[in-house]
Image (cartoon, rainbow, N blue to C red):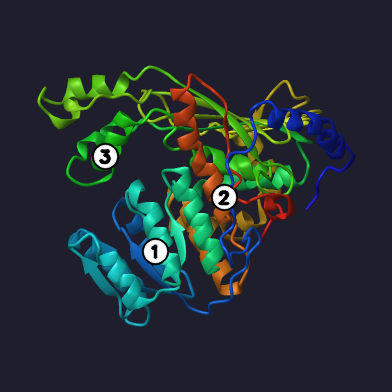
Amino acid sequence: MNTPDVSRRNFLKNSSGLAAGLMAAGSSLAAMPARPEGAQYRGDYAAPKIDTVRVAMIGVGARGSGHTRRLANIEGTEIVAISDLYEDYVQRAKGYCDEVGKGERHTNVKLYHGEAHLWKKMLREVRPDMVIIATPWKDHAPMAIEAMEQGAHAFVEVPLGLTNQELWDIVDTSEKTGKHCMMMENVNYGRTELLYLNLCRKGMIGDLLHAEAAYIHELRFQMEEQDRGTGSWRTPHYAHRNGNLYPTHGLGPVAQYMNLGRGDDNFGTLVSYSSPAMGRALYAEKNYAADHKWNQLDYRGGDINTSIIKTTMGRTVMVQWDETSPRPYDRLNLIQGTKGAMASFPTRIALEGGVPGITENHHKWAQGDALEAFMAEHDHPLYKRMGELATRMGGHGGMDFLMAYRMVDCLRNGEPLDQNVYEGAFWSAVSELSETSVAQGGAPQAFPDFTRGNWKTTQPLGIVS
């Protein structure tokens, strides 16, 4: 891994006064509870090796069914149990196991469905090594905590939890039990995100100054899912909460480019503002009867939320969220350094002195077909080795498969996960902090330090091959 040295040290030195000023000016760290007795920091934690990873699924609807199919295809896994409220979902997921196993693997899958509490019975009876949680947001934290307490590593769909108290409870449970709890931020495994991580580690855009991240995805059509499915439980969130409800798809990758929470820097404070709340109410009025339940909601959540994070080093990250407005999908994925910038949608790179063989200077983006050879040269080693397979296996262009593969690979080889429990907590904490800031007119909110100061000794994410 190549990292800038002299300029970076100067940057750190010049930023130290600013960081100290932030803490002194009413932006001190949020209250930090004491570490529970017997708990240990897990930033670089590597759990004991597991030769064959026994996997249990909780929730096999839209996301969980895909996780089941991909995990069933990965060597060294055995799907041992599937739980969901709905029998048809469970049978569909079981079908994936049967198709892949062909009588040799996944041959004794226990099925649980019909009652809300049966996932707990499953954990006690099956005692899996790994639990995949792909359920409504409110269930993520209690399910992850119970899974760890029952002896399993927990892998949770985004966000990790809804409140910062839930995030502290998850961190404390992971530290006490010695079980991983990883939020499954799949976007970190996209080709472009892996490429940018590799280029940042090579120092190609210099010292990192600023990032922009977003989840801009018009999803009003999900309101058609009224009895079950994503829209049935997400729509009330849009009505009752006002902030950034889904920050991690954009934030996760840029946070790892910048090593936030990993030795170099950490999350400091956040300010947040929301636009008026109009789009969901207008959509409901246009598409549903006046007495429909969607027209009985008071939509208070702004259509567009913009938050700005100031790090302890003094760097900045803009995070936007909008699942309502009619516009193309975008995650921004912009990282600005002292020698250049990289951004997405479309993928484009600008370097001081130009991108070799493509542009002459930083006043023009290198993008499109002209950028392909440069990308192929600098692709992340993981993508070079497995990108073609991942694309065939699918899941958001292959990122879901790469994530699942790495999760299993790390458990089987006793290596630290690519995303530790603290990163999931930091990235998810944006939701509550943004809601509080919006409610207080944009007042700065201090991030909890879920590492209790140990981020300073945590290794940056390496470039694994």
Helix, strand or loop at mark 3 = helix
- Rounded to the nearest whole Å, what is the CA distance between mark 3 and mark 2? 36 Å
Instruction: Residue type at mark 2: give it.
Output: Pro
Q: Are marks 2 and 1 in contact (CB under 8 Å)?
A: no
Locate residue 102: give its quadrant: bottom left
Pointer 1: what residue?
A: 146
Q: Tell whether 42 sits left or right of 94.
A: right
Mark 2 or mark 1, earlier in chain: 2
Total numbered labels: 3
Residue 338 in view (yes/no): yes
Pointer 2: what residue?
A: 33
- Badge 1, how many Cα within 10 Å: few under 14, some, many 20+? some
Q: Where in the figure is residue 235, as x and y percent of width and height?
A: 27, 35
What residue lies at 47% left-to-right and 58% top-to-bottom? 401
- Badge 2, how many Cα within 10 Å: few under 14, some, many 20+? few
Q: Tell whether 113 sits left or right of 168.
A: left
Above-or-below relation of 374 to 134: above
Q: If the image is split into quadrants, where does the C terminus sit?
A: bottom right
What residue lies at 28% left-to-right and 71% top-to-bottom? 121
Helix, strand or loop at mark 2 = loop
Tell which residue pokes out farthest to the right in this image.
6
Q: Where in the figure is residue 294, as x and y percent of width and height?
A: 19, 29
- Rounded to the nearest whole Å, what is the CA distance between mark 2 and mark 1? 21 Å
Pointer 3: what residue?
A: 231
